[in-house]
Image: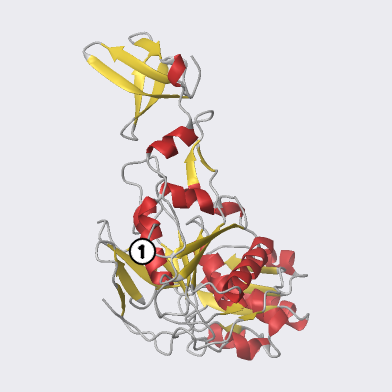
C-alpha cells in the first residue's frame, strides 16, 4: 500500500473511499476523499482494501472532469494565458501530500472547461514556481512575454500567479509596460482539489476582465466570500490582507476599479481608468535589483542600516506620517550622502506620508529622504527599482503618479 493508491476503508460502521496520502504518524492513515476533503483514520481500527487496478492518476482525473475543446472563432477576441505557477495552476502531489505547481497554461484550459467559448486562447509558460520564489529576473521574463503576446495581437492578457507575491509582480508590470490592452493577474487561494476552490471563478472573471476596456494592470480575485463577483483591483494599489480567505485582496485607500459578475459575465468599471488603445505598447524592463525595503520598529538598532551601505536604494516603512527614531537620522544622512536613494513610506494602511509636520520628519527631509506620498511600501520598492534605471530624475519620478500608485487625495471611503 503506497501513497497514491485508491483505497476503500472500513472503520466500524463508517466507510471511506479515496486516495491514500502520506501520513505524519505511523498510527493513522490519511485519505483524500472524492469530495476533496481529507480524513484521518486510526490504522489499527481500519480494514483497508487497495484497488490496485485503479491506482489514482492525476491525468486520468483531469480527463474525467472533461476537456475543453478550444477552437478558433473569428468573432472572439484573443486572450493570452501566461502561467508563472501558483495555486491556480497546482494540484496535489500524491507522493508527498503537498500542493505543488504542475500545470502549464494549456492544462489550465483543460481544467477549466468554462473558459471555452469566451475567447480564443494562446498559452505560454514563463515559470512554474510558487510565488515566494518570484524574483526580479522572472519579472523581466514575464514583462517580455506579455509584450510579445500583445505585439503578436493579443486583445488581453491573463497572468496566472501565486497570490502571496502577486501584488509585487502586478506593480512591476505596471511600471515596466505601457499597455494598450488589459493585463489581468489572477490566482487562487485554494487548490483545484478542494470543494471551495476559487480557481474556476477567478479564471473566468479574469478572462472577461481581459476583454474589457480597462487597459491597466489589474488583479482579479473574489470580491467577497460568495461565488458571485470578482473585484478588479489596480495592480499598484492592491494588497493581500488575509492568509487564506478567497477575498484576500483589497484596494488600499479607494474602492476597486470595478467588478466582474460570474454568472452574467458583466464587467462593471466604477472609477476612472486608462482606456483600451489609449497607450502605445512599450517595454522598459530594466530594473535596479540593489534595492531593499526596511521596516522600522521601536527599539531597532539604527546600525542595521549599515548593512545597506552599498545599496542603490532603500524604502523605509516608517511610522505614522513617515517617521523613524531620531537615532536613525544620522545613518540615513550618511546613506544619502553616499548616493543611496532613500524613500519614506508608512506602515499605516490608509493615508499618506508628510514629513513636514513634526521635527523628526523635517530632519529626515534635511537628510535627503524622498517622500513616498501614499504609495504602498511594496509598490514603492518596485517603483524605485524601476526608476533608478529608467528615470532621469529619481526624486521627481518617485513623487509623480505613473500607474495609479499615487492618489491625489487620501480620503476615507466605505
Q: Residue at x 24, y 10 (%)?
A: 12
Determine whether 226 is above or below 45 in the image. Answer: below
Task: Give the quadrant of residue 381.
Answer: bottom right
Q: Residue at x 72, y 72 (%)?
A: 288
Q: Is residue 150 visible?
A: yes
Label 1 SS = helix
The answer to which of 387 and 177 lies nearer the viewer is: 177
Q: How is the image coloured?
A: secondary structure
Determine whether 150 is above or below 113 in the image. Answer: below
Q: Residue at x 42, y 65 (%)?
A: 119
Residue 65, position in %: x, y?
37, 40
Provide the residue designation for mark 1. Answer: 205
Left or right position of 175 against 258 = right
Residue 173, position in %: x, y?
57, 72
Left or right position of 42 against 264 = right
Report crowding for label 1: few under 14, some 14 to 19, many 20 or more residues within 10 A (C-alpha): many
Residue 42, position in %: x, y?
35, 15
The answer to which of 308 and 229 lies nearer the viewer is: 229
Determine whether 158 is above or below 214 in the image. Answer: above
Q: Is residue 381 visible?
A: no
Q: Residue at x 49, y 30 (%)?
A: 94
Task: Give the quadrant of residue 151.
Answer: bottom right
Amino acid at each position: 500500500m503506497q501513497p497514491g493508491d485508491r483505497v476503500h476503508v472500513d472503520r466500524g460502521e463508517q466507510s471511506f473511499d479515496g486516495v491514500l496520502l502520506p501520513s505524519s504518524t505511523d498510527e493513522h492513515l490519511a485519505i483524500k476523499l472524492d469530495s476533496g476533503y481529507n480524513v484521518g483514520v486510526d490504522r489499527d481500527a481500519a480494514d483497508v482494501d487497495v484497488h490496485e487496478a485503479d491506482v489514482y492518476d492525476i491525468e486520468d482525473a483531469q480527463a474525467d472532469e472533461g476537456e475543453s475543446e478550444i477552437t478558433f472563432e473569428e468573432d472572439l477576441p484573443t486572450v493570452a494565458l501566461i502561467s508563472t505557477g501558483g495555486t491556480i495552476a497546482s494540484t496535489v502531489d500524491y507522493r508527498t501530500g503537498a500542493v505543488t505547481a504542475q500545470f502549464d497554461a494549456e492544462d489550465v484550459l483543460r481544467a477549466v472547461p468554462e473558459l471555452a467559448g469566451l475567447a480564443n486562447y494562446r498559452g505560454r509558460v514563463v515559470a512554474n514556481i510558487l510565488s515566494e520564489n518570484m524574483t526580479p529576473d522572472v519579472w523581466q521574463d514575464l514583462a517580455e512575454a506579455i509584450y510579445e503576446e500583445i505585439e503578436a495581437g493579443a486583445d488581453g492578457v491573463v497572468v496566472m500567479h501565486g497570490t502571496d507575491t502577486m501584488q509585487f509582480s502586478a506593480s512591476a508590470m505596471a511600471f515596466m509596460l505601457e499597455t494598450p490592452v488589459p493585463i489581468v493577474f489572477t490566482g487562487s487561494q485554494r487548490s483545484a482539489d478542494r470543494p471551495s476552490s476559487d480557481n474556476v471563478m477567478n479564471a473566468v472573471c479574469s478572462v472577461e476582465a481581459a476583454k474589457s476596456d480597462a487597459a491597466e494592470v489589474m488583479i482579479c480575485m473574489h470580491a467577497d466570500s460568495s461565488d458571485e463577483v470578482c473585484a478588479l483591483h489596480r495592480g499598484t494599489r492592491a494588497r493581500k490582507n488575509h492568509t487564506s480567505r478567497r477575498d484576500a485582496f483589497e484596494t488600499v485607500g479607494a474602492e476597486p476599479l470595478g467588478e466582474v459578475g460570474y454568472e452574467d459575465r458583466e464587467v462593471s468599471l466604477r472609477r476612472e481608468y486608462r482606456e483600451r488603445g489609449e497607450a502605445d505598447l512599450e517595454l522598459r524592463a530594466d530594473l535596479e535589483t540593489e534595492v531593499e525595503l526596511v521596516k522600522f520598529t521601536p527599539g531597532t538598532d539604527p546600525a542595521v542600516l549599515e548593512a545597506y551601505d552599498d545599496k542603490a536604494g532603500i524604502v523605509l516603512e516608517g511610522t505614522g506620517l513617515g517617521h523613524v527614531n531620531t537615532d536613525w537620522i544620522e545613518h540615513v544622512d550618511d546613506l544619502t550622502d553616499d548616493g543611496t536613494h532613500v524613500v519614506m513610506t508608512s506602515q499605516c494602511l490608509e493615508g499618506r506620508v508628510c514629513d513636514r509636520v513634526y521635527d523628526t520628519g523635517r530632519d529626515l527631509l534635511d537628510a535627503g529622504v524622498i517622500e513616498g506620498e501614499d504609495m504602498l511600501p511594496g509598490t514603492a520598492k518596485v517603483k524605485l527599482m524601476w526608476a533608478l534605471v529608467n528615470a532621469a530624475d529619481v526624486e521627481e519620478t518617485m513623487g509623480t503618479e505613473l500607474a495609479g500608485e499615487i492618489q491625489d487625495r487620501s480620503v476615507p471611503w466605505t
